[in-house]
Amino acid sequence: MSKDPVTHAKGLSAVIPNDNDGYCTVYKMDCADGLGLMTVYQVYPGIQLIYNDFEATSCDWNESQDKNILEINHCREGREGSTLLSGSCLYLGEGDLSIHTMDNCSPEMSFPLKHYRGISVVINLETVAQNPPEILSESGIDILKFKEKFCPDGSCFVMRAKDEIEHIFSELYSVPDCLQKPYFKIKVQELLLFLCMVDVSKEKQREQYTSPHVEIVKEIHKKLVGNLQARPTIDELSKEYLINTATLKDTFKGI
């Protein structure tokens, strides 16, 4: 696998180095109905911090990635969706955080609001285990156990928006260029220490949806925006599309 996960994206039209040492690279993504920018920072060996800015409804990928690559996603604005290998569909709303291994990500990311802004932290677990940031060594954190903790049996961990997540990520959206390198190092370490303290069993995770229900809700949304004068009730839509009313409301709100 390439050291940089975004090199597998379809429609990669331009690579713009922002420096001479490979610390920062900007990738321009040609999506089917819009554009995206992914600004990648090599914060530590094996750890990348990526700013994602998309004005499109979807972005395709060529292939799955390594099972020992862990991706942490934070949604700042808009909404981001993906289909996991299990067939379930995951949607992040503003402030939500997800963790999954790269071999579990779908070949397409979707952005239902045609706008998405967020941050990804991509960790090569084996590389970081061999050469950990100093604070990980001092704290005795075993980065290899993160996969077992958050993604057992190929699952995906999703944490709803909360103050602790907001504190870590909000400051990353307003960092002066002159302070980026040291600040990114501090924030990545803070994130890893926070995740080490998370009790997965006590977290109320965001719901994941089945692919058939997602497709039905997309059809309903298309019907509604196609005729804004019509005012069908939830019961009418539920009967027409053969979907439970509670499932319809929850899935529609989630997507």
Image (tube, rainbow, N blue to C red):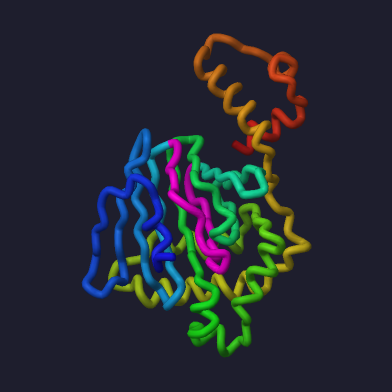
Magenta stretch: residue 162 in it? no
Q: Position of residue 18 (x, y in %)?
A: 24, 64
* Viewer-nearest residue: 24 or 232: 24
Residue 2 vertical position relative to residue 251 in the rendered view, above or below? below
Residue located 32% across and 49% down the image: 12
Q: Position of residue 133 (x, y in %)?
A: 49, 83
Residue 214 vertical position relative to residue 48 in the rendered view, above or below? above
Q: Position of residue 111 (x, y in %)?
A: 48, 40
Q: Is residue 128 left or right of residue 213?
A: left
Residue located 35% across and 58% down the image: 39
Residue reaching furthest to the bottom:
138
* Viewer-nearest residue: 137 or 193: 137
* Viewer-nearest residue: 75 or 43: 43
Total numbered circles: 0
Magenta stretch: residue 60 in it? yes
Residue located 50% across and 59% down the image: 65
Q: Which residues are magenta?
A: 57-78
Quadrant containing the N terminus is bottom left
Residue 150 vertical position relative to residue 242 in the rendered view, above or below? below
Residue located 57% across and 64% down the image: 67
Q: Is residue 154 left or right of residue 43?
A: right
**Quadrant in the picture for residue 176:** bottom left
Q: Position of residue 81 (x, y in %)?
A: 55, 43
